[in-house]
Image (cartoon, rainbow, N blue to C red):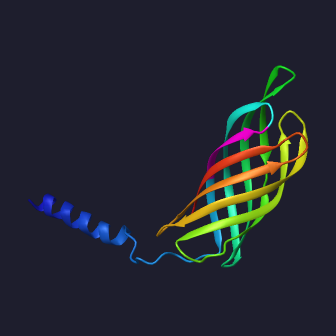
């Protein structure tokens, strides 16, 4: 009987000591997260996948400046040849967030250094259109990103988790 009471007491005490004590979200200017998404080359290709990491800084409640490090797997068709490529991308952007509520639309632009692992590198311009859903302890952000460059137009849909 004593071991059972001791086990219940330990369980109850650990529940109170390991749980979060407040119901208020943590306010912070720096956010880290990860990205999962699909990409589609606009010319001669099929859909691929994108994974990556995210860092965003909010100097003002209506502005977010961010940098991502993404790994994209793309398949293109050039002269009836299918070329599979792996790209390392570092989008740097500024996003305008006009509302300060739980649901915040985003509109942004920036630059994207893009390095194919086969040796081709380029810098593309990007446009971002998204939505941030701020939950209690983390944020979910579905986002469209259009990357345009010389012979390299890509459309991305990403689901971003940050906290």
Camera-nearest residue between 135 and 96: 96
- Is 117 left or right of 49, judged from the image as shown? right
Task: Give the extent of the magenta segment.
Answer: 35-42
Q: Quadrant of residue 20?
A: bottom left
When the figure is inspected, residue 104 is found, relative to residue 44, above or below; the finding is below
When the figure is inspected, residue 46 is found, relative to residue 154, above or below; the finding is above
Residue 39 part of the magenta segment: yes
Q: Quadrant of residue 44?
A: top right
Identify the image quadrant of the C terminus.
Answer: bottom right
- Residue drawn at x 55%, y 76% as measured from the top left: 101
- Is 118 left or right of 55, judged from the image as shown? right
- Residue drawn at x 52%, y 72% as measured from the top left: 102
Residue 89 part of the magenta segment: no
- Residue drawn at x 81%, y 35% as measured from the top left: 43
Camera-nearest residue between 24 and 78: 78
Residue found farthest to the top: 80
Q: Main secondary structure of the magenta part?
A: strand
Query: At which x and y percent is residue 119?
Result: 89, 36
Residue found farthest to the left: 1
- Is 13 left or right of 85, judged from the image as shown? left
Query: At which x and y percent is residue 64?
Result: 71, 70
When the figure is inspected, residue 124 is found, relative to residue 107, above or below; the finding is above
Question: How many labels, in total?
Answer: 0
């Amino acid at each position: 009987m004593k071991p059972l009471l001791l086990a219940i007491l330990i369980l109850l005490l650990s529940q109170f000591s390991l749980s979060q004590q407040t119901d208020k979200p943590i306010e912070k200017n720096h956010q880290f997260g990860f990205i999962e998404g699909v990409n589609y080359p606009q010319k001669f290709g099929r859909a691929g996948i994108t994974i990556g990491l995210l860092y965003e800084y909010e100097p003002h409640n209506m502005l977010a400046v961010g940098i991502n490090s993404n790994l994209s797997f793309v398949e293109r068709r050039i002269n009836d040849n299918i070329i599979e490529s792996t790209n390392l991308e570092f989008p740097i952007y500024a996003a305008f967030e006009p509302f300060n509520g739980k649901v915040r639309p985003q509109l942004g632009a920036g630059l994207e250094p893009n390095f194919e692992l086969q040796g081709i590198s380029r810098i593309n311009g990007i446009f971002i259109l998204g939505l941030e859903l701020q939950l209690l302890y983390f944020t979910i952000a579905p986002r469209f990103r259009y990357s345009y460059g010389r012979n390299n137009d890509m459309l991305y849909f990403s689901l971003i988790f940050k906290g």
